[in-house]
Amino acid sequence: MATLAREVTQPVDPFDVSRPDIYRDDTWHEPFRRLRAEAPVHKVADSDFGPYWSVSTYKPIVEVESLPDLYSSEANGFTISPIASDEVRMPMFIGRDRPIHTAQRRTVAPAFTPSEMVRLTKNIRDRSAEVLDTLPWNTGFDWVERVSIELTTQMLAILFDFPWEDRAKLTMWSDWMGDIELAKSEELRQQRLEKIYECGAYFQKLWAAKAGAAPTPDLISMMIHSDAMSHMEPNEFMGNLILLIVGGNDTTRNTMSGLVYALDQFPAERAKLEADSALIPNAVSEIIRWQTPLAHMARTAQQDTELMGQQIAAGDKVVMWYISANRDESVFGPNADDYQVDRPNARRHLAFGHGIHRCVGARLAELQVAILLEEMAKRRMRVNVTGAPDRVAACFVHGYRHLPVEISRY
Ligand code: HEM
């Protein structure tokens, strides 16, 4: 396999922060600390994903995100993984440039307005309460499986008005589609393709049912009845639908897992939160900063340019490491590695990106995590981590496969 050959013949670049093992082993802090201090814009000559520029501090990431015509999301993929020539083309607006991006984003944005969030709140709260009420007290279980995955799946099913009994399919498809590491193996790529087709066929049926009916306030109906989306090719419609499922899945899940892990690691912060639930909104922003559920997004330079004194050539891949910018000492101070529920500038984090592609689902994710914390507080529920977390081995999705816990009352 190409991956193996590279490992055998070339020394590993200590600054190649795309290596999945550093996320699996939670050893990414040190290489990024050095990158921020010594080379915030650094060229990695080769990696499993090919050559790329690493941007690891706050300021140049904001610069790249603020120049979307110079740094394209469309030219060669929006993650570190390049677009393979034989890949099924399923365009999504996260990977489009202006003006198409603007038109397509505008179609789904109304599903995430503050008034929509108010409308969804009761449903999300009732479902979250139900999940918490089924948890065993003082017995071990996996928080990822019982809470993070379940609540995220329910949130997405509510947003899409997806058949409730089939909701686990949403997560299963999304897990297949959101994993960029799979692109490295031909066999897994084929299996992924099958899942994409299966998902497509299912949504086609849903689409047919909703297309003939009066508009309803869910995302699928909104997309069907919009101008920009209703005239697009089936592949593009599917791509955008998948984007909304995948975009909300791992991210919200890993925020909810990171939340209980961070509270367990920082008991003095947990005590502050348990004593004062007015801190919940800030604690939510802070967990999104601290966890940074998507470690990076990427762009491709459209012209030769300069970034912090480095010469970037047209066609170069530029990777923006949000995970590192969110630990930038010049913005978050010397204790940037700590989870601090009352951190004054927690909301300045870059975990949702910045600029025209800034996460469209940010409010929904914050709402779900805030509701979880509120419902835990009502039950005086403390989540104690009982063993080492099993972490995702990937440089894109930054999260947990399993997290053993036990709950007790405080
Ligand atoms: C875009 C993170 C939750 C849907 C993004 C981007 C990031 C991100 C980093 C790209 C920003 C950029 O390139 O500048 C997160 C995090 C979440 C989260 C950390 C949870 C804590 C959600 C949810 C949904 C969603 C719940 C929807 C259900 C999207 C979509 C885009 C996006 C559709 C594309 C926006 C565009 O290109 O204009 N998100 N996301 N995300 N996210 Fe999220």
Image: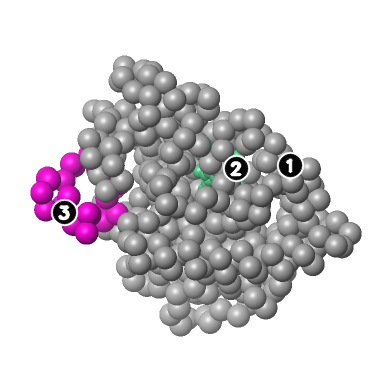
119 with respect to 384 (left or right): right
**Residue placed at 45% from the left, 64% from the top?**
192
- Outermost residue toward the right in this view: 214
Q: Secondary structure at mark 1?
A: helix
Please give the label number shown on residue 228.
1
Residue 380, placed above or below residue 350: below
For residue 35, side relative to residue 368 (left or right): left
Q: Which mark is residue 93?
A: 2
Q: In terms of depth relative to the viewer, which is nearer, 136 or 254?
A: 254
Classify 10 Å Cα crowding around label 3: few (below 14), some (14-19), many (20 and above).
few
What type is the residue that disc 3 sits on? Ala
Per the model, the C-alpha gap separating discs 3 and 2 is 35 Å
Labels 3 and 2: the sequence-earlier one: 3
> Which mark identifies residue 5?
3
Residue 89 in percent (x, y) is at 52, 50
Contact? badges 3 and 2 (CB < 8 Å): no
Tag 2 and tag 1, C-beta contact below 8 Å:
no
Q: Residue at x 78, y 46 (%)?
A: 226
Specify the segment rendered in magenta. Answer: 1-22
- The CB of the residue at mark 2 lies under 8 Å from ligand 1: yes
Q: Nearer the viewer, residue 161 or 211?
A: 211
Q: Does 189 sit above or below residue 354?
A: below
Q: Please tell me whether residue 84 is drawn above or below residue 123 in the rendered image.
A: above
How far, Cα to Cα, is label 1 from label 3? 45 Å
Q: Kindly identify the residue that appears in the image at 51 percent across and 68 percent down.
A: 195
Q: Is residue 2 magenta?
A: yes
Pick whichever of labels 1 and 3 is earlier in the sequence.
Answer: 3
